[in-house]
Image (spheres, rainbow, N blue to C red):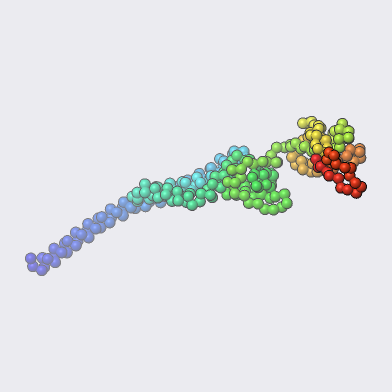
Amino acid sequence: MDPIDRIETSAGDMVIAARTAWEQASALIVTYSFSLVGALIVLTIGYILSNVLQRSTYAALGRFRGFDETLRKFFSRIVRYAVLIIVGVTVLAQFGVQTASIIAALGAVGLAIGLALQGTLQNIAAGIMLLVLRPFRVGEYISAGAVAGTVQEIGLFATELKTFDGLFVLSPNSELWNSPVTNYSRNPVRMQEIAIGIGYGDDIALALRTYAEIAAADERILAEPPVNCFVSALGDNAVVVAIRYWTKSADWFQTKIDFTRKAKLAFDEKGISIPFPQRDLHIIRAEGSAPAKAGAEPKLLLE
């Protein structure tokens, strides 16, 4: 073959190769153009849908009476991010990416994050349960384990409290959830028992009447349930007389202080004694021993 024929053959092969490459590129452009347009449409619809579902979830949860604001935001954001993740996986599938491997990778990442943040996730779960079941609310005084104070804020991770002496306490939600919670403010009324020891020679009936008179004169002490005055114990040094009465929870502490002071003043006025602790001393002589000489110290037996 002469050189001219070789050149013509090579030129023809190049033209054919270029035409084939163009046809393949055109096919790819057309194919991926549709995929790109479809992906953009899916992204746009998914983004709009995620926002709509977030607002709808937030509004729907607001229809439940007493549903916490923090939980409304938390669950509505979870819905939004879940939709966006689904949209992202769908878009990748448009370009032929194997979504099964992506889902498996997301699962592995989620598992690793869960193990790394185990304590944090436990606090989040406990915070959700505290916000849903509401064993306490903001402004209520509680005690749980070693923690006690007035609740200032309930978060997803921790709860803020203020102690009676003004200290700030930040308690992880998991500790509050895993401990028995005593709520001193939840019920509208509370019972109080005050017990005072009087002398064995004093008039018990007079002491009980004095209790009743003080309770009747105090408007904070409720008539129902009725006041109960009684003898609660016979102690070593005193007869213990007690009173049980009910007040509003907000008046409980101050009423106790005032009642105790009034009872002491009334007992003093009516001659009812509040005895000090006493001990009886018995002098025991050994059999056959001579009488003790003057100035000798006797042997004492303490009972």
Residue 166: x and y, percent?
71, 52
Confirm whether residue 255 shows in the render: no
Picture quarter with the C terminus:
top right
Residue located 67% across and 41% down the image = 183
Report x, y in % for residue 268. 90, 41
Residue at position x 63%, y 41% in the image: 180
Q: Quadrant of the N terminus?
A: bottom left
Whether residue 269 appears in this view of the structure is: yes
* Residue at 17% from the left image edge and 61% from the top image edge: 13
Residue 301 versus residue 179: which sits nearer the camera? 301
Residue at 25 percent of width and 55 percent of height: 23
Q: Describe residue 248's horizontal placement relative to residue 72 as left or right.
A: right
Q: Nearer the viewer, residue 23 or 106?
A: 106
Compare residues 142 and 301 and report the one nearer the observer.
301
The residue at the far left in this view is: 1
The x, y position of residue 51, in whole percent, is 50, 47
56 lies above or below 213: below
Q: Most extreme residue toward the bottom, as rendered?
A: 3
Question: Residue 61 vs residue 81: left or right?
Answer: right
How many marks the image carries: the answer is: 0
Q: Is residue 206 left or right of residue 48?
A: right
**Residue 69 occupies which quadrant of the picture?**
top right
Q: Position of residue 167 (x, y in %)?
A: 69, 53
